[in-house]
């Protein structure tokens, strides 16, 4: 993996900052959101059902990537019909959020040198096709929402942490200590996270030979783990490479969250650029 001192890494991290961005008023407000009831119901189901056994079963079932063959564009079209039940900020179709995120990155970091970063913004939530009835028809609690390590004690930084009391792993002595089934510094690559679109898309990228740089793949894999990149949790499970790469999550996070604006992007005008990038970094047909 390239180090954080390579030229394009250094430019981005100096510009974006290595610290988590301050949260603007109104974003990720789970108490006053107009979608509060929907979001609370979602997180209860998510926190109760995301067990070690469930995640292991889903990885075995889905990560063979033998269910569908489709282009990246076809996946984008499917995603346009998905609304994220965990999101307290918006009920726009997902393609709106993808373009808002990607265009915010593209505006701050223009040019071919950063085109992989633009693409990460555009595809980072594409794993949510898991919830589409024409794809996998998975329940949303097993697809979207904040992700978190499982098999060890839950951090106080996880949203709606109180719901974990009904999770079978909560009182399991193998899983409810600080390190649980892991060792200190084991590395996030060796930690099971709650199952969802982040890990799924990361595995789709890896197993299909995607050429996005490793730091971009790290963003895709952990961008929903707010307890890590926004609250600084679980550093004791990280190795040195993870700690360096968390800077990338913080750089990406401001675009993922703070680009959610009422104005909708001009989809048809923008798609050709991102189609070019998908063609550059992915094979023509992708296994899902």
Image: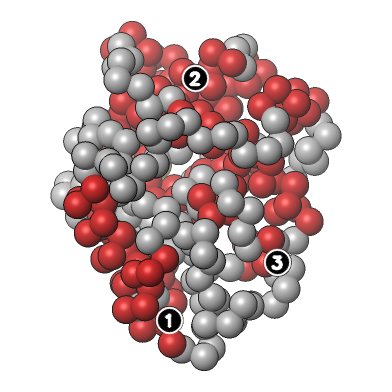
Dot 3 crowding, Cα within 10 Å, few <14, some 14–19, many 20+: some
The local secondary structure at tag 3 comes to helix
**Mark 1 touches mark 2? (CB < 8 Å):** no
Q: Position of residue 186 (x, y in %)?
A: 70, 70
Separation (CA) of disc 1 from disc 2: 39 Å
Can you give x and y, in whole percent of width and height, for residue 285 in the image?
38, 37
Question: Which one is nearer the viewer's eye here, 176 or 56?
Answer: 176
Q: Residue at x 62, y 39 (%)?
A: 20
Percent of width and height locating residue 193: 49, 64
- The single residue placed furthest to the bottom in the displayed view is 173
The residue positioned 22% from the left and 43% from the top of the image is 35
Secondary structure beneath disc 1? helix
188 relative to 119 in the view: left or right: right
Residue closer to the observer: 203 or 42: 42
Which is nearer the N-term, disc 1 or disc 2?
Answer: 2
SS of the residue under disc 2: helix
Picture quarter with the N terminus: top right
Q: Which mark is residue 236?
A: 3
Local crowd size for mark 2, using a 10 Å CA cut-off: few (<14), some (14–19), many (≥20): many
User: Is 236 or 29 nearer to us in this picture?
Assistant: 29
Considering every residue shown, the one lying at the far top of the view is 269
Q: CA distance from mark 3 to mark 2?
A: 32 Å
All told, the count of numbered labels is: 3
Residue in view at x 66 percent, y 27 percent? 16
From the image, tell me which residue sits under label 2.
104
Is tag 3's residue or tag 1's residue first in the polypeptide sequence? 1
The answer to the question of whether label 3 and label 2 lie on touching residues, with beta carbons closer than 8 A, is no
| Above or below 254: residue 131 | below
Q: For the view shown, which residue lies furthest in the left direction? A: 133
Q: Is residue 27 visible?
A: yes
In this figure, which residue is indicated by the disc labeled 1? Answer: 170
């Amino acid at each position: 993996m390239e180090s954080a001192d390579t030229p394009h890494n250094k430019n981005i991290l100096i510009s974006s900052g290595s610290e988590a961005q301050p949260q603007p008023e109104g974003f990720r407000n789970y108490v006053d959101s107009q979608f509060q009831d929907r979001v609370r119901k979602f997180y209860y189901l998510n926190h109760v059902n995301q067990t070690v056994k469930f995640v292991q079963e889903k990885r075995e079932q889905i990560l063979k990537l033998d269910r569908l063959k489709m282009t990246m564009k076809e996946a984008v079209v499917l995603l346009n019909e998905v609304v994220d039940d965990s999101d307290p900020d918006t009920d726009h179709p997902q393609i709106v959020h993808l373009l808002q995120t990607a265009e915010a990155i593209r505006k701050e970091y223009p040019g071919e040198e950063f085109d992989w970063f633009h693409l990460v913004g555009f595809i980072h939530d594409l794993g949510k096709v898991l919830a589409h009835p024409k794809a996998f028809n998975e329940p949303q609690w097993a697809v979207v929402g904040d992700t978190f390590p499982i098999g060890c004690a839950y951090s106080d930084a996880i949203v709606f942490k109180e719901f974990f009391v009904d999770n079978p792993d909560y009182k399991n002595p193998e899983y409810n200590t600080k390190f649980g089934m892991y060792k200190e510094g084991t590395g996030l690559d060796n930690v099971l996270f709650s199952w969802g679109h982040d890990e799924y898309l990361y595995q789709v990228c890896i197993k299909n030979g995607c050429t996005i740089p490793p730091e971009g793949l790290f963003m895709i894999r952990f961008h929903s783990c707010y307890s890590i990149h926004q609250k600084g949790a679980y550093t004791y499970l990280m190795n040195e490479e993870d700690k360096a790469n968390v800077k990338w999550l913080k750089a990406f996070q401001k675009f993922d969250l703070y680009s959610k604006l009422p104005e909708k992007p001009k989809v048809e005008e923008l798609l050709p650029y991102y189609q070019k990038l998908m063609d550059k970094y992915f094979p023509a047909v992708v296994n899902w």
